[in-house]
Image: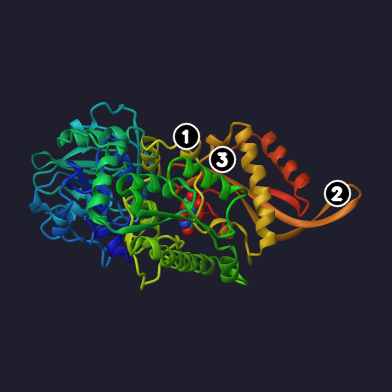
Amino acid sequence: MNSASAHTASITGITSKSISESIVVLDYGSQYTQLIVRRLRELGVFAIIMPHTASLQEILENQPKALVFSGGPTSVYDEGAPAIIEGLFESDLPTLAICYGMQLVAHSLDGEVTASSHKEYGKAVLTERRSALFDGVDSESVVWMSHGDSVTTLPSGFEVIASTADTAVAAMANTNKNIFCLQFHPEVQHSQDGQKILENFLELTGFSRTWQAEHIVESLIADVQAQVGDKNVLLGISGGVDSSTLGLLLHKAIGEQLLPVFVDNGLLRQGELELVSQSLRSLGLPLHVVDAKEQFYKALAGVTDPEQKRKAIGKTFIDVFSEKARDLEKTVGEISFLAQGTLYPDVVESAGGHGAANIKSHHNVGGLPDDLSFELLEPFRTLFKDEVREIAAKLGMPPAMKNRHPFPGPGLAIRCLGDITAEKIDILQRVDNIFITMLIERDLYGSTWQALAVLTPLRTVGVVGDGRSYGYTVALRAVSSIDGMTADWTRFPHEFLADVSNAITNQVPEVSRVVYDITSKPPGTIEWE
Ligand code: XMP
């Protein structure tokens, strides 16, 4: 799967037939592009990202009712800076251009952008606002600026619609053509009324804003039925909310053609196998469980590099699925599809939509072999996690299961630093279980987006009773986040952390020290590997 296929594909899973209004966000390399998409979806419009290298035809295939240009790190004067897509202005689509997007509009038409060594970064207040785009925006409302270059000459047909103390053209518009340009970032939380501005843009350009995650269940089912026909589908279930929800959806869509497989890779949390198989079977999923612990441990033996671990796990999963498929085919006939609960952030993070670095190979996106013998079925690849949770609720998943923290496909392997052994996984399982159980008992589980424990190879000296101990250091991590793309560490009460630490050192003799990770993302990632 390459970045082009991840981004230029028309909306899969949800088609423009079933979504009457969509908006295409053209990505000029901003770190906030996904955030723009989220904000628009929160406002009831189905938004997708496309790269700035897409052709006009590819964009129009998605039948957008409007466009958004994201910001970006470059100057319009940089060599190789993204240019405007040929024919885009002639398409007469209403457009909201943000930051670099605004400079690109000015530069591509007959305006002028002036490069400046002085960078305006941070909060600013909009003055002299002259547009319905700012209706309902507080006069003291703060917006978030982050730019070096500025628009100094307006293109014909444009007028200034807002300024700040430092920037004369903080926003400009060509109202006849419905092109609105903002030098600041309405999508970030620091822009106090940013969401109102986005909402006003949607109102001004005639969106009816009826899109809701729960409405898409029926269209997803119809699309899956059309894509799969009478073929069989193998689904890898991880116990997480994404693959479990996909299981329920596919079961509803194609019934017995769905073959859900839960692989015990020996890297699961304590009691996970029993919990997941019981709860999914009680929801009607005919789960096939495969014990592949030995196969995974063998593939991981001596592997310490995080990327190698992920790749080894991804490959072993495919081997196990293929073996199981061959076995099942003896009774059900050919299996053509492999379904995965891949989400939009996985696609964007793994593919690096605009040439960004591949931070981690998410095993269900980046780790697939080129010669995969299944066709991939990924109905959620344009959805965010909270949208999947809404679908889960609609499909009858109990809240405790729907609201489970995310758990990575490679499991505890990427939380057990260094080489993997059954003994280390066992220690980590016990530590993790204490932490998660205490979070639930103290009613704190729902107050954090994801909580986890990491077993480090670091041994330190401790004192137990009258004796000396020399055990492992474990790290606890809990983060607050919206979709895992950015995160901050969760501020638990100190008493709670003290109690968890005591419980771990008392109940897990192999551990002599507990630390709490206070790194945000960025610069840290959520998982340690
Ligand atoms: P990072 O560590 O990249 O994690 O900040 C962001 C979110 O993604 C989860 N994660 C994964 N999920 N396969 C998955 O299914 C993976 O390979 C993977 N790596 C990270 C992580 O738990 C967090 O929720």
Lower sequence index among marks 3 and 1: 1
Image height of 521 relative to 218, above or below: below
Secondary structure beneath disc 3?
loop
In front: mark 3 or mark 1? 1
Q: How many marks?
A: 3
Numbered badge on residue 101 = none
The residue beneath circle 3 is: 490
Percent coordinates x, y for residue 133 in the rendering = 21, 33
In front: mark 2 or mark 1? 1
The answer to which of 341 and 206 lies nearer the viewer is: 341
The residue beneath circle 1 is: 399
Q: CA distance from mark 2 to mark 1?
A: 41 Å
Q: CA distance from mark 3 to mark 1?
A: 22 Å
Q: Tell me the kind of residue under disc 2.
A: Val
Question: Is 341 on the left-hand or right-hand side of 501?
Answer: left
The answer to which of 156 and 348 lies nearer the viewer is: 348
Question: Is 353 on the left-hand or right-hand side of 68?
Answer: right
Question: Is 39 on the left-hand or right-hand side of 324?
Answer: left
The answer to which of 117 and 132 lies nearer the viewer is: 132
Ligand 1 neighbours mark 3 (CB distance < 8 Å): no
Q: Tell me the kind of residue under disc 3.
A: Thr
Q: Residue at x 89, y 47 (%)?
A: 465
Secondary structure beneath disc 2?
strand
Q: Residue at x 26, y 53 (%)?
A: 12
The residue beneath circle 2 is: 464
| Crowd rating for badge 2 (residues with CA inside 10 Å; few <14, some 14–19, many 20+) | few
